[in-house]
Image: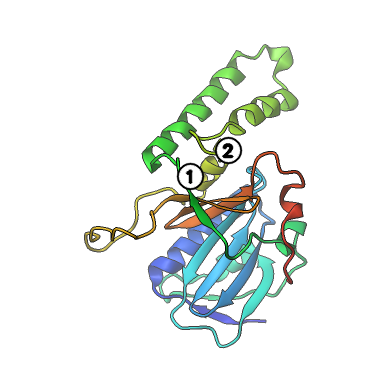
Amino acid sequence: MNDQLRFADSGEAADLAAFLGRLVHYDRAAAVRLQAGGGALAVFGRPPSFDILAIRTVRLAAPVAMPLDLTVSAGELLESVDEASAEATVPGPVTGPPWAGVLPPRGGWRQVPGLPGPEAMAAAVAAAVAEFRARDEALPVQHRTRSERDRIGREIWSRTLGDTELPLRAVHAAQSLGFLRPVRAAVPAPAPLPDAPAPVALLAAGTWLRLRTPYGSVAMRRPGVTGGLGALQVRPV
């Protein structure tokens, strides 16, 4: 295919490379689904450790001539990213995993109140990690098995954040993928407009939840909804 992507600047290329690198860290054979239209590229991935969809949107230097929608190797795309020239070459398509054929809804999102600030979210994740380590270390040797550790992990990471329905594992995923961090800015940012969207927000659409940040989003089905990611709305690959 060998389509060339030209990003708005080197920072966009660097952020995309960092996102792809984290996906490959969790799964060396990771695939990503790409959708480009207008002046933006959306990259979808699924880190196996978190059971969420990760979404990174990258600004392009100019609108694409033709819409792009395909699944490729995350590692091959990462290798092609040239941060200095702010370009990347789209690898050939691969047979995507089941999640790549289903995506969250594009519209209909509404903001949900009750989300703590980024510092509070980071503190909640740190406390959960500390609790897991303490409980793991307290296990008798005969009980220190993968299944027991998985049980403890499920119990901790399925807890919801504050008064929201968002599981802690979604916040942990956002932090691990580099989505929860200070916004990069060359000059001091102006004061936000009264009706400007919050930099970090919890959104809902039907049975979906999405944690949106300036650097990307994580999306998942609401707790208690059966079917996992495989029950999402199917879109053509």
Indicate the secondary structure of the residue bearing disc 2.
loop
Q: Say how the picture is coloured.
A: rainbow
Q: Which residue is tagged 1?
A: 175
Residue 49 image-quadrant placement: top right
Quadrant of the rendering where the N terminus is positioned: bottom right
Q: Which residue shows up at 41% across the image and 75% down it?
A: 8
Task: Work out which residue is located at the far bottom of the displayed protein and give it.
Answer: 65
Q: Distance between the residues labelled 2 and 1?
A: 13 Å
Judge from the rendering whether residue 110 lies leftward or rightward of residue 207; answer left or right: left
In the rendered image, which residue does mark 2 sit on? Answer: 167
Q: Quadrant of residue 123?
A: top left
Q: From the viewer's perspective, tell me whether residue 120 is left or right of residue 221.
A: left
Secondary structure under tag 1 reads helix
Question: What amino acid does circle 1 point to?
Answer: Gln
Residue 150 image offset from top left, x and y in percent: 69, 29
Residue 211 showing in the rendered view: yes
Which corner quadrant of the image does residue 137 belong to? Answer: top right
- Earlier residue among tags 2 and 1: 2
